[in-house]
Image: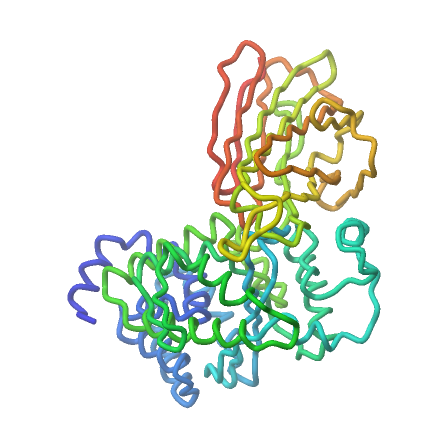
C-alpha cells in the first residue's frame, strides 16, 4: 500500500479516524477487515500485522512503540488499557463470532446457523475456525424447557443453542447463548460478537467479487445471500459438513481480499464497519465489565436502554419493536413494516395508539428450493414500552387479541415488554394496533416530549410516522436508534 496516499487520506479524514480508533482496534483484528487503519502509522501496522499473523514475540516492542505514538490522544490511551488483555497477552482469549441470518429474523438479528471461533494466545491470533451451530447443539445433554412461543411454534419440547438468542437485550442473550455453548461441549468464551448477513454484503460491495473454485461460483454483493442460502440449506441435515465447508471457503477468500485492499478501500471499510455498528448489524458483548461499559462501545452492545425519565420539563416515551420469525423460513426477505404512532394528551394522561403494518409480498405459502425464502410470516412480536404503560389493548386487523400475551418487566431499565403472535399470510397485509396510557405527574403545558426509538438488529430500515394533534406528522426512516424531541403544546 502506498504510504503517501494513506497519509493524504488520513489528513482528509483525520476527525473520523480519531473518533473511531477505540472500537476499530479490536473489530479490525477480529474480522481482518481494517488492518490498514493502523498502517496510517507504521508502528500501528506492525502491531496489528504481528497479532494477526501470530507473532506474539513482537507484541511488547510494537505495543510500547504504539503507546508512545498515541500518548497525546486521550481516547486511544484509554483503550490501550484494554488491548493487551483483549488479545491474551499473558494467556489466551477466545471470542465467538455468531453468524446470523437476518432473513430469518431473531431478536438479536437473525437465526444463528454458524459461528467462528477466534483464539488469541500471548497476543497472537492462533486460529480462526468456522463451525456449524448444530455441532455443539448435538452435544447438549441437559434438557431445557423452551420459552412458550418456541414450544408453540416448533412443538419439540426442548430449547437448543440455535434458538437461544431469544432475549432482545444482547448482553442478557449472550449469557444464555454462552451457557448453551458450554453445555454443548464448547470452551468458555471471553466475548460474543454477532454479525448479520447485511454486514457481509456491505463488505462485498467494497472488495468486489470472490471466486470459489471448489464450488464453481463467483460471489458478489448481489448474489451472496441467495447462493449462501442454497449452499448451506439444500439437502442439509444435522451432522453434514456442507455449511461449515462452504462458509470456511468463503471466509478464507474474504479475508484474503480484505488483507489486500487498497487505500481507498481501507477508508471505505472504516465507514462500513461504523455504519453496521450504528445500525446494529454488528453487536459486541465482552465478559470484562470495564470494557463493556467503555463509553465508545456502549451504543454497540445491543443492550436495552432507556436513557430519559420524566421531570417537570419533559415527558418521556420509549418504543422498541422486536420481531421473531418462528416459521422456519426466510419470509423476512418479503416482509415490509411501517409504524404509525398517534399521541394524545387527556388531562393527566398521555394516550398513545401504536399502529404496525406488515405487508408480506411472498408469492408462495412455503419456501422453494429456487429462492430459499418466503412463505407465511409466523412472527412472535414483542413491543417494548415504558414500564409505566397501562390499560393496554391489542387489536389485530381490528379484532381484540384473545390469545395468550406474554408480559415481562425489565425493572432495572424501566421497560415493559408485551409479546404475542402475528401471522401474515403471503400476498396480504396485517395491521396491529396497540392502545396504552401513561399517567403524568406534571402539568404538560410547555413540556417537551422525548421519544426514544430502539431499532432491531437484522432490519435494514422502516418508516416511523409520529402524529400529534394539530401538528404536521413527522416521518422518520429508522435505520439506527433515534431520540426524537417535540413540543406537545
Outermost residue, top direction?
470
Viewport quadrant of the C terminus:
top right
Q: Position of residue 216 (x, y in %)?
A: 36, 72
* In the displayed structure image, the side of residue 259 where residue 489 appears, left or right: right
Q: Position of residue 288 (x, y in %)?
A: 61, 67
Q: How is the image coloured?
A: rainbow
- Residue beneath the point at 46% across and 83% down: 124
Query: In this picture, is 218 found above or below 188?
Result: above
- Residue beneath the point at 75% across and 50% down: 153
- Residue beneath the point at 33% across and 56% down: 205
- 41 and 6: which is toward the camera: 6
Query: In this picture, is 339 found above or below 168?
Result: above
Outermost residue, left direction?
4
Q: Position of residue 112 (x, y in %)?
A: 61, 62
Q: State whether residue 296 appears in this view.
A: no
* In the displayed structure image, the side of residue 19 where residue 414 appears, left or right: right
* In the displayed structure image, the side of residue 138 where residue 472 appears, left or right: left
- Residue beneath the point at 81% across and 63% down: 158
How many numbered circles are shown?
Answer: 0
Q: State whether residue 124 appears in this view.
A: yes
Query: In this picture, is 15 found above or below 466?
Result: below
In which quarter of the view is residue 447 placed?
top right
In which quarter of the view is residue 133 placed?
bottom right
Viewport quadrant of the N terminus:
bottom left
Query: In this picture, is 91 found above or below 25?
Result: below
* In the displayed structure image, the side of residue 98 where residue 13 appears, left or right: left
Amino acid at each position: 500500500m502506498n504510504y503517501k496516499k494513506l497519509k493524504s487520506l488520513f489528513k482528509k479524514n483525520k476527525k473520523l479516524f480519531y473518533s473511531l480508533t477505540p472500537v476499530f482496534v479490536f473489530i479490525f483484528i477480529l474480522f481482518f477487515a481494517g488492518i490498514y487503519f493502523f498502517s496510517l502509522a507504521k508502528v500501528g501496522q506492525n502491531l496489528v500485522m504481528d497479532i494477526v499473523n501470530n507473532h506474539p514475540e513482537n507484541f511488547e516492542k510494537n505495543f510500547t512503540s504504539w503507546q508512545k505514538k498515541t500518548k497525546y490522544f486521550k481516547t486511544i490511551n484509554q483503550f490501550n488499557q484494554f488491548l493487551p488483555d483483549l488479545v491474551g497477552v499473558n494467556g489466551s482469549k477466545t471470542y465467538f463470532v455468531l453468524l446470523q441470518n437476518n432473513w430469518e429474523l431473531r431478536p438479536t438479528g437473525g437465526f444463528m446457523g454458524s459461528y467462528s471461533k477466534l483464539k488469541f494466545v500471548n497476543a497472537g491470533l492462533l486460529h480462526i475456525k468456522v463451525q456449524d451451530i448444530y455441532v455443539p447443539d448435538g452435544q447438549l445433554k441437559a434438557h431445557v424447557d423452551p420459552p412458550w412461543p418456541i414450544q408453540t411454534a416448533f412443538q419439540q419440547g426442548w430449547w437448543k443453542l440455535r434458538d437461544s438468542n431469544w432475549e432482545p437485550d444482547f448482553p442478557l442473550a449472550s449469557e444464555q447463548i454462552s451457557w448453551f455453548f458450554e453445555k454443548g461441549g464448547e470452551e468458555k468464551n471471553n466475548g460474543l460478537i454477532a454479525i448479520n448477513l447485511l454486514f457481509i454484503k456491505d463488505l462485498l460491495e467494497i472488495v468486489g467479487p470472490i471466486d470459489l473454485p471448489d464450488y464453481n461460483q463467483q460471489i458478489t454483493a448481489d448474489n451472496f445471500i441467495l447462493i449462501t442460502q442454497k449452499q448451506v440449506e439444500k439437502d442439509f441435515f444435522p451432522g453434514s459438513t456442507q455449511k461449515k465447508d462452504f462458509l470456511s471457503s468463503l471466509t478464507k477468500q474474504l479475508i484474503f481480499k480484505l488483507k489486500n485492499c487498497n487505500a481507498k478501500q481501507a477508508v471505505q471499510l472504516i465507514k462500513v464497519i461504523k455504519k453496521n455498528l450504528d445500525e446494529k448489524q454488528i453487536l459486541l458483548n465482552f465478559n470484562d465489565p470495564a470494557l463493556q461499559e467503555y463509553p465508545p462501545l456502549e451504543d454497540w452492545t445491543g443492550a436495552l436502554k432507556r436513557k430519559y425519565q420524566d421531570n417537570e420539563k419533559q415527558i418521556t416515551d420509549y418504543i422498541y419493536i422486536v420481531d421473531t420469525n418462528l416459521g422456519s423460513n426466510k419470509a423476512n426477505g418479503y416482509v415490509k413494516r411501517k409504524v404509525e404512532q398517534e399521541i394524545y394528551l387527556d388531562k393527566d394522561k398521555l394516550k398513545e395508539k401504536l399502529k404496525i403494518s406488515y405487508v408480506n409480498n411472498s408469492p408462495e405459502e412455503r419456501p422453494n428450493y429456487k429462492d430459499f425464502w418466503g412463505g407465511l410470516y409466523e412472527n412472535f412480536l414483542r413491543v417494548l414500552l415504558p414500564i409505566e404503560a397501562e390499560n393496554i389493548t391489542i387489536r389485530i386487523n381490528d379484532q381484540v387479541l384473545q390469545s395468550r400475551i406474554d408480559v415481562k418487566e425489565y425493572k432495572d431499565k424501566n421497560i415493559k415488554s408485551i409479546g404475542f403472535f402475528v401471522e401474515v399470510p403471503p400476498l396480504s397485509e396485517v395491521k396491529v394496533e396497540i392502545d396504552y396510557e401513561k399517567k403524568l405527574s406534571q402539568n404538560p403545558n410547555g413540556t417537551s416530549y422525548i421519544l426514544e426509538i430502539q431499532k432491531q438488529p437484522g432490519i435494514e430500515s422502516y418508516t416511523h410516522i409520529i402524529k400529534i394533534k394539530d401538528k404536521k406528522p413527522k416521518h422518520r426512516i429508522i435505520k439506527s436508534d433515534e431520540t426524537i424531541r417535540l413540543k406537545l403544546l
